[in-house]
Image (tube, rainbow, N blue to C red):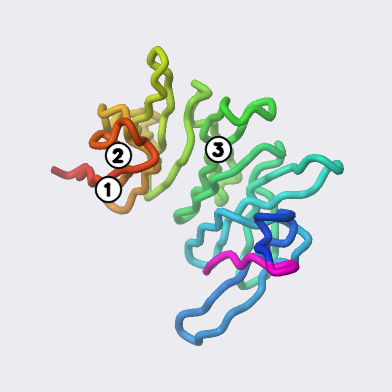
Amino acid sequence: MYVRLKSVDGQYAYYQHDQYNSLYLYNLSTSEEIQLTLYEHATYGASIYGNKIVWSRSNQVNPGGYSTNISIYDIPTKRVSDISRTGRAGDGKIYENIVVWVEHKNGLMNIMDVYMRDITKHETRQVTFDGNSTDPDVYGDRIVLEKIYQEGEKRSSDIYMYNISTNETTRITNSTYAREPAIYDDKIVYIDSRNTPKYPEEGDIYLYNLSA
């Protein structure tokens, strides 16, 4: 499954208008490619589990702005529904019945918190409350995320883990250069720029073993 960018006048959509993005599904067993959404909505940041796909969908609300929500697509029924409805959501991920995403508060990109929704129980929960949390991922009972904080003039970031059942948060890294976590089973991987502090856009891949 991937996102296709429609080209217009020889340029990709991200150089023009977001509404030219569309969601496609590629079936590895049959080698079939199916277009799931039309070009009427911006589509990016897709995540799939089983028969469910979540992605960020934008609607133009005025000539100069977009309202972005996390939507979910059910492959067998072809039904689309919204997970978030604030118009300021992004970075959606899904595992089993849990969807996680980021809400940008009051339309400010630098004030953000992580939310989750149990699509089986139809319950939504706010996971963080500090306004500095982003890039969530989920596996089983665990949500990993990046927290961004300011230390003087330095912009720092580290990885944290939230346990859904116990409502407890654990700090995973202390390097102050860790970002973009992903989790599977007992393994967390992330990017860390501790070896290139003058060039934070660069970095190495690290693995944290929760069972070790």
Specify the label residue 102 is tagged with: 3
Query: Which element type, helix, strand or loop, lies under badge 1?
Result: strand
Q: Find the distance from the CA under tag 2 to the CA under tag 3.
A: 21 Å
Total marks shown come to 3
Toward the viewer: 96 or 38? 38
Q: Amino acid at mark 3?
A: Val
Q: Which residue is mark 1?
A: 205
Image quadrant where residue 212 sits: top left
**For the view shown, which residue lies furthest in the right direction?**
63
Pointer 2: residues within 10 angstroms few (<14), some, or many (20+)? many
Where is residue 54? Give x, y as percent: 58, 56
Pointer 3: residues within 10 angstroms few (<14), some, or many (20+)? many
**For the view shown, which residue lies furthest in the top direction?**
152
* Mark earlier in primary sequence (1, 2): 2
Q: Which residue is mark 2?
A: 192
* Mark earlier in primary sequence (1, 3): 3
